[in-house]
């Protein structure tokens, strides 16, 4: 019977898991499809006198996989909080929560600046450089022309994430790099296809899948000011609904940006028309943002074009322990505009 392997590398460079030994209850890792930091939770049994909280800034590196395969490096995580819970009868546990270090490092201070007559790719490269990183950007997003963009009292992460979302991308930090792939594109920022996550009904341990017959909005619109005509205009992009229109709260800065913002909003509204989560055995190839193919769930669901919006990995270490994944589902189907 194969066994999962988990390594939690501490400040000293040594694996902490052997030292925790039987006290280790579980390690959980949430892999998000951009926009939010990845996170780990480490839970182990404790007793009085209880251990102190980790020092602020303590970092952990997580590696995981099956015993017959290479390990995947989930990245570096910085301590955020810990909790102590339990009772006299059942005993006590301590859970350490840490978030992706690259997100933490890029989100330390707010700043203001502006960019003129440039491209999205150049903006992301400059932002990445200021946080000591390089940027890998989807080629189509990188080429988008940006006449003017103001960053006003925003963190680097907040500004970069807002720009990525408006242009139909998503922001993720990993391996010391700023990554900007297409939202739900099923590809990495460098354009490589992610492995498709095939979920057969026979392998599912539990879950729930919900689908709407129709999307909520038929289109999404973004306003922009046309200086040549001195008038406010609207760019609309189709979504997958059949009735109302979604309007962006803030106007775009140019017609080109309004076009990308409307398409991104239309796609995001379509994404929410499928929701749910399925629990299966862990897989090294499963990555948040990858396409999901269902099998055995009925013709309409099996034909659905889905994406893994996040994957929550749980590793347990008791006699019946193992590695399970909860895969959050979203729709990849978009309007044709």
Image (spheres, rainbow, N blue to C red):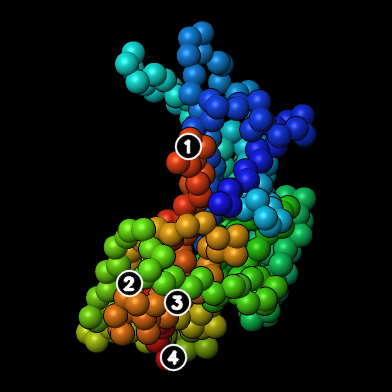
Give the secondary structure at mark 3.
strand
- Provide residue 83's location: percent of width, then percent of height: 45, 26
Decide which of tag 3 and tag 1 comes sooner along the chain.
3
Q: 298 or 270: which is nearer to us?
A: 298
Q: Closer to us: mark 1 or mark 2?
A: 1
Q: 50 or 263: which is nearer to us?
A: 50
Q: Closer to us: mark 4 or mark 2?
A: 2
Give the secondary structure at mark 4.
loop
Q: How many neighbours does mark 4 have within 10 angstroms: few (below 14), some (14-19), or many (20 or more)?
A: few
Residue 327, compared with residue 184, is above or below; it is above
Q: Which mark is residue 337?
A: 4
Decide which of tag 4 and tag 2 comes sooner along the chain.
2
Decide which of tag 1 and tag 2 comes sooner along the chain.
2
Q: Which mark is residue 274?
A: 2
Decide which of tag 1 and tag 4 comes sooner along the chain.
1
Q: Closer to us: mark 3 or mark 2?
A: 3
Residue appearing at x 32%, y 75% in the figure? 297
Mark 1 lies on residue: 319
Q: How many neighbours does mark 3 have within 10 angstroms: few (below 14), some (14-19), or many (20 or more)?
A: some
Mark 4 → mark 2, Cα distance in angstroms = 20 Å
Disc 4 + disc 3, Cβ < 8 Å:
no
Mark 4 → mark 3, Cα distance in angstroms = 24 Å
Give the secondary structure at mark 2.
strand
- Provide residue 292's location: percent of width, then percent of height: 46, 73
Residue 206, compared with residue 165, is above or below; it is above
Q: How many neighbours does mark 1 have within 10 angstroms: few (below 14), some (14-19), or many (20 or more)?
A: few
Q: Quadrant of residue 170?
A: bottom right
Residue appearing at x 71%, y 67% in the figure? 136
């Amino acid at each position: 019977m194969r066994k999962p392997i988990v390594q939690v590398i501490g400040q000293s460079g040594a694996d902490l898991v052997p030292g925790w030994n039987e006290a280790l209850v579980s390690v959980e890792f949430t892999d998000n499809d951009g926009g939010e930091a990845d996170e780990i939770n480490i839970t182990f049994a404790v007793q009085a006198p209880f251990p102190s909280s980790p020092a602020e800034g303590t970092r952990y590196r997580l590696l995981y996989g099956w015993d017959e395969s290479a390990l995947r490096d989930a990245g570096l995580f910085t301590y955020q909080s810990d909790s102590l819970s339990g009772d006299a009868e059942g005993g006590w546990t301590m859970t350490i929560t840490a978030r992706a270090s690259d997100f933490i490092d890029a989100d330390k201070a707010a700043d203001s600046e502006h960019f003129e007559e440039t491209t999205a790719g150049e903006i992301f490269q400059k932002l990445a450089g200021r946080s000591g990183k390089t940027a890998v950007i989807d080629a189509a997003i990188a080429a988008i022309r940006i006449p003017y963009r103001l960053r006003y009292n925003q963190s680097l992460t907040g500004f970069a994430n807002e720009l990525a979302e408006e242009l139909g991308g998503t922001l993720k930090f990993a391996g010391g790099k700023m990554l900007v792939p297409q939202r739900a594109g099923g590809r990495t920022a460098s354009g490589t296809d992610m492995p498709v996550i095939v979920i057969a009904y026979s392998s599912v341990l539990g879950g729930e899948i919900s689908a709407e017959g129709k999307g909520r909005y038929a289109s999404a619109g973004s306003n922009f000011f046309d200086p040549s005509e001195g008038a406010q205009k609207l760019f609309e992009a189709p979504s997958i609904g059949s009735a109302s229109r979604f309007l962006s709260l803030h106007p775009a800065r140019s017609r080109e940006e309004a076009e990308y913002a409307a398409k991104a909003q239309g796609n995001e509204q379509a994404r929410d028309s499928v929701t749910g989560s399925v629990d299966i055995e862990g897989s090294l190839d499963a990555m948040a943002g990858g396409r999901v193919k269902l099998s055995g769930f009925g013709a309409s669901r099996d034909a659905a074009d889905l994406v893994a919006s996040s994957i929550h990995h749980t590793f347990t270490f008791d006699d019946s322990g193992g590695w399970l994944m909860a895969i959050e589902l979203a729709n990849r189907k978009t309007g044709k505009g």
